[in-house]
Amino acid sequence: MPGWDISPSGVDSVTSLVRLAMDDMAKDVKAYVTDVESAAASAGTLGTSYCGAAPVGPIGDALTRFMVGTESDVRFLGKRAAKSVNGAIEATNHYVAGDLEQAANAQEQAAQAPDVTVFLPTARQRGAGPWT
């Protein structure tokens, strides 16, 4: 690849900052899930008398459907960031080792979008969100 001029310390600095941002984003996503679950539970129902647990009302149902509909988008953010950071590190390591072909391959692989559908069933089983 012509024009390669990588600063390994610069890559390390930037990827460290991105990892910090990813950690913050993960905390925000957890808070988002908790807040939406709380809102759905607090939204009430159409009826006033029921035995046992309160049924989910229309607002709670809408919030749950929204979370289910946006789940893969939210998961994509984290997977995309991780794939980009890991690809940058891998490409830089190959560059430092003098293997520009492997560096180019790592860069190309990192540029491909991650497939989050592979992770959704496992995440649903582990998670405590309304989509479980």
Image (tube, grey):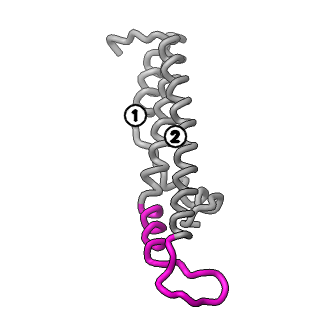
Which tag, 1 or 2, sits closer to the chain's start? 2
Q: Which of the pair 99/47 is nearer the observer?
A: 47
Residue at 65% in and 89% down: 51
Residue at 54% in and 11% down: 97
Mark 2 closeness class: few <14, some 14–19, many ≥20 residues within 10 Å: some
Mark 1 and mark 2: span between their CA atoms? Answer: 21 Å
Query: Is residue 66 covered in magenta?
Result: yes
Magenta span: 43-69
Marks 1 and 2 in Cβ contact (< 8 Å):
no
Q: Quadrant of the C terminus?
A: bottom right
In the figure, 41 relative to 96: above or below?
below
Q: Which residue is mark 2?
A: 25
Q: Which mark is residue 111?
A: 1
Q: Which of the pair 65/105 is nearer the observer?
A: 65
In the figure, 91 relative to 19: above or below?
above
Residue at 42% in and 52% down: 73
Residue at 54% in and 57% down: 35
Which secondary structure, mark 2?
helix
- Asked whether, in this view, residue 104 is left or right of residue 124, the answer is left
Q: Which of the pair 130/60 is nearer the observer?
A: 60
Which secondary structure, mark 1?
helix
Q: Mark 2: which amino acid?
A: Met
